[in-house]
């Protein structure tokens, strides 16, 4: 995990509850394996009847961008699933249709020999093993129903969020009523504490939520407020107090981050969440997660993995634009540590990786912001935005300041939704390229600022010119 909080390391110590008392893991010794399948034969699903596994909204998004379905869109073969389910004491807890894998949980590893004998199984990899002890992370806290009056800024509709949106020219899109209406954004994170109780969030358009972690949390709304803060930067619409970058977009809240351990299975959970976002028709995904170092060294990623096609999570992330979805991912907060580099899936192809800068001119890079390039030489981060510090709303319902590339990313994500609303004929890849092209370092990109600070009004005007051509 890398919930990109202020000065977090690759192991996200800043987001772990660590100070709380640990307790014995109550589910006993067990393991989770990723099973790679050879094909999708003997399946009732076909490319000619996609409405059986993709929503109409998802299909409409692809049709609008002239994108064809392919075999990766087909679900995992149900016949293969049934054959594995017949093996006693083997539990299937997840799957990826894009990468054709299953997640199975076992207590007796000798059962894996039976799985290995199945003709459609290519190979397997252990991605999780039970810890000796854990710290409970689900915790409800008290919250405020109203913002403090000192955060009320008369004559300034955006309230505290104005500067972080102004730096990217986002207010100019809002001025022409481009506020993300009709767009749907998935937020993949570790928890959304009190989003279901804080009135400001309850006035936002939250379409649903889903937990992909095994075992699931008692409530995604009792877990970390990292996702709460991320969501606030986009979704809130509280005039003169706080207005987000896409206040009229719809949102899905998806939990893929397990704070109790730090293991590779979280990449599988993330992939499941991304595929779900695609299936329900989300247009964009904001992910403020990143990975490189796990509890078990054999699972960790060396630098050469940062090529967009090696890490499991990055393989899936690199497919998103081809499905018509824009992924905005935080670069990471390892700039001051020994790792320094971006994390996966920030290395993915055809995504926008976002670093953090200070809120005042000349907008210096935050020292913690992870650097690029990708190992195959692509510019990373792609762009930078205000994140050191930035105003957000936390799980107690307070407007406050925090730091991290996690919080720069959703500002960009929300404004990307507004830009796409204004230029609905553009594809995901075209919107990504317009954002890069509009950035103030586009002529000479580097591995610290990338293409620079995107100027969304400029991106809109460039898009209009290309439309007229």
Image: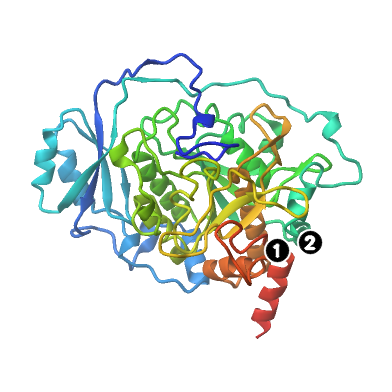
* Circles 1, 2 touching at the beta carbon (< 8 Å): yes
Please provide percent x and percent y for residue 183.
61, 57
According to the picture, the residue beneath numbered tag 1 turns out to be 456
Which residue is farthest right?
155
- Relative vertical location of residue 111 with respect to residue 235 in this rendering, above or below: above
Residue 172: image tag: 2
Q: Please tell me which of labels 1 and 2 falls first in the chain.
A: 2
- Element assignment for label 1: helix
The image quarter in which residue 173 lies: bottom right
Identify the residue at image location x=33%, y=19%.
25
Quadrant of the drawing holding the N terminus: top left
Q: Residue furthest bottom?
A: 469
The location of residue 443, given as percent across then percent down, is 63, 72
Residue 32's spot in the image, x, y percent? 26, 36
Quadrant containing the C terminus in the rendered view: bottom right
Residue 206 at least partly seen:
no
């Amino acid at each position: 995990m890398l919930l990109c909080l202020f000065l977090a390391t690759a192991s996200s110590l800043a987001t772990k509850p660590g100070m709380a008392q640990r307790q014995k893991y109550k589910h006993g010794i067990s393991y989770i394996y990723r099973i790679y399948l050879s094909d999708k034969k003997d399946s009732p699903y076909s490319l000619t009847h996609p409405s059986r596994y993709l929503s109409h909204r998802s299909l409409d998004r692809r049709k609008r961008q002239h994108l064809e379905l392919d075999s990766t869109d087909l679900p995992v073969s149900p016949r293969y699933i049934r054959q594995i389910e017949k093996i006693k004491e083997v539990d299937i807890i997840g799957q990826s249709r894009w990468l054709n894998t299953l997640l199975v949980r076992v207590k007796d590893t000798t059962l894996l020999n039976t799985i290995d004998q199945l003709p459609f199984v290519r190979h397997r990899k252990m991605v999780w093993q039970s810890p000796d002890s854990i710290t409970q992370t689900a915790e409800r806290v008290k919250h405020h129903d109203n913002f403090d009056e000192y955060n009320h800024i008369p004559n300034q509709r955006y309230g505290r969020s104005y500067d972080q949106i102004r730096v990217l020219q986002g207010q100019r899109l809002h001025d022409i009523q481009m506020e993300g209406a009709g767009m749907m954004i998935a937020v993949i994170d570790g928890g959304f504490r009190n989003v279901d109780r804080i009135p400001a969030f309850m006035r936002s358009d939250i379409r649903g939520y889903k937990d992909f972690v095994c075992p699931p949390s008692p409530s995604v709304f009792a877990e970390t407020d990292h996702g709460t803060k991320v969501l606030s930067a986009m979704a809130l619409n509280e005039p003169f107090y706080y207005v987000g970058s896409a206040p009229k977009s719809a949102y899905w809240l998806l939990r893929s981050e397990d704070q109790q351990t730090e293991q590779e299975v979280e990449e599988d959970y993330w992939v499941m969440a991304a595929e779900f976002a695609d299936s329900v028709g989300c247009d964009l995904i904001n992910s403020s997660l990143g990975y490189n170092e796990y509890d078990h060294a054999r699972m960790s990623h060396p630098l050469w993995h940062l090529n967009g096609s090696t890490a499991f999570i990055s393989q899936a992330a690199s497919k998103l634009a081809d499905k018509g979805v824009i992924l905005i991912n935080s670069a990471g907060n390892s700039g001051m540590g020994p790792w320094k580099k971006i994390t996966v899936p920030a290395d993915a192809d055809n995504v926008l990786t976002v670093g953090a800068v200070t809120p005042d001119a000349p907008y210096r890079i935050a020292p913690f912001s992870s650097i690029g390039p990708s190992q195959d030489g692509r510019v990373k981060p792609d762009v930078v935005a205000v994140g050191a510090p930035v105003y957000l709303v936390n799980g107690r319902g307070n407007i406050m300041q925090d730091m991290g590339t996690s919080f720069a990313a959703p500002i960009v994500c929300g404004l990307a939704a507004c830009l796409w609303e204004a230029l609905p004929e553009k594809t995901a890849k075209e919107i990504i390229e317009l954002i890069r092209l509009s950035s103030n370092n586009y002529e000479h990109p580097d591995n610290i600022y990338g293409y620079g600070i995107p100027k969304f009004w400029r991106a809109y005007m460039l898009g209009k010119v290309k439309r007229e051509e």
